[in-house]
Amino acid sequence: MQTQFEKTSFLKRLKSMFKVDFKRAFTMPLIYIMAGVSLVMPILMLVMTSMMGGEDGSAFTSVWQSIGSVSGSGMSMDMTAMCNINLLYFLIAVFVCIFVAEDFKSGYVKNLFTVRSKKSEYVISKSVVGFTGGVIMILAYFIGAMLGGAIAGLSFGTEAGAGGIVACMFSKIFLVAVFVSIALILSVVGKQRLWISVLGSIAAGALLFTMLPMMSPLDAGFLNVIMCLAGGALFGAGLGAISNVILNKTSLV
């Protein structure tokens, strides 16, 4: 009697990969450390700058300045324009780099690709986990900003309106996919050499940093949300495909 082995479908393998990656992500301290840093960062920025005061742009006058600026406000280079939620994209990239590099350092990927999944499923799973971690960090920062603003006694009034703030936050969430895909492709290039992926991700992020206020202003609208969603999807699909090719064409060490 001939033994027949059931062929595992792509969706079943992907589901298994998701289960493994999410379990690893939420049992490691990394994501909790990153979320904690994201929560504390705006509290410290808002409280400390309010305590120091200053009339030269070195102090926040509104809690929403830690989220972003309204469109058409120009390319200001003062502290309040540079120290806001957009800094989190660098932290998100570092999160992805560390998470992926740990797979290569431990030899986990060799065992994974031998007995469980294909490279494409690995890339998709890491992208989704990285995006989820990034969203958690964005939301943690938002909560921290609200707490920091309340502690510092800053104004919650804004000309952007509630709708603009909601659209701004959705735009920034969708942009997470861009930075995750960049960090992922550099992580599969650097593999266990974490410093390569981190430096590369920070350098690439710095090139995009000046575009973030224009793409996701505080008074964002529906068009901003759609553009950021499309950008995140295109970067995720395009760079994800390249990451898959790199994994298939290079060694896993």
Image: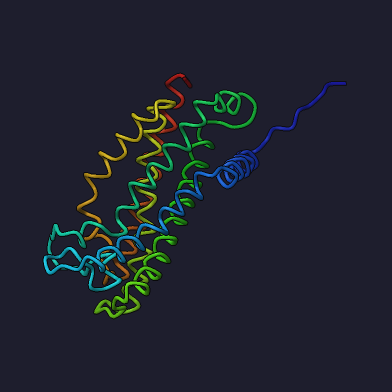
Q: Nearer the viewer, residue 48 or 144?
A: 48
Which one is in front, 52 or 34?
52
- Could you tell me which residue is drawn at 54 percent across and 26 percent down? 106
The quarter of the picture where the N terminus appears is top right
- Is 180 placed above or below 245 here? below
| Relative to 111, 172 lies left or right | left
Q: Judge whether 146 appears above or below 78 on screen.
A: below
Quarter of the image for residue 148 reads bottom left
Tell me what residue is drawn at x 59 percent, y 41 percent: 24
Q: Quadrant of residue 64?
A: bottom left
Report how many numbered discs are placed on residues in the image. Answer: 0
Residue at x 38% of width, y 52% of height = 176
Q: Residue at x 29, y 67 (%)?
A: 223
Decide: is 15 above or below 67.
Answer: above
x%, y% of residue 202? 29, 40
Judge left or right: residue 9 versus residue 195: right
- In the figure, residue 115 lies in which quadrant? top right
Instruction: Name the one closer to the observer, 80 or 252.
Output: 80
Left or right: residue 19 compared with residue 159: right
Residue 43 in percent (x, y) is at 36, 63
Q: How far across and how far down the image is residue 68, in percent?
A: 26, 65
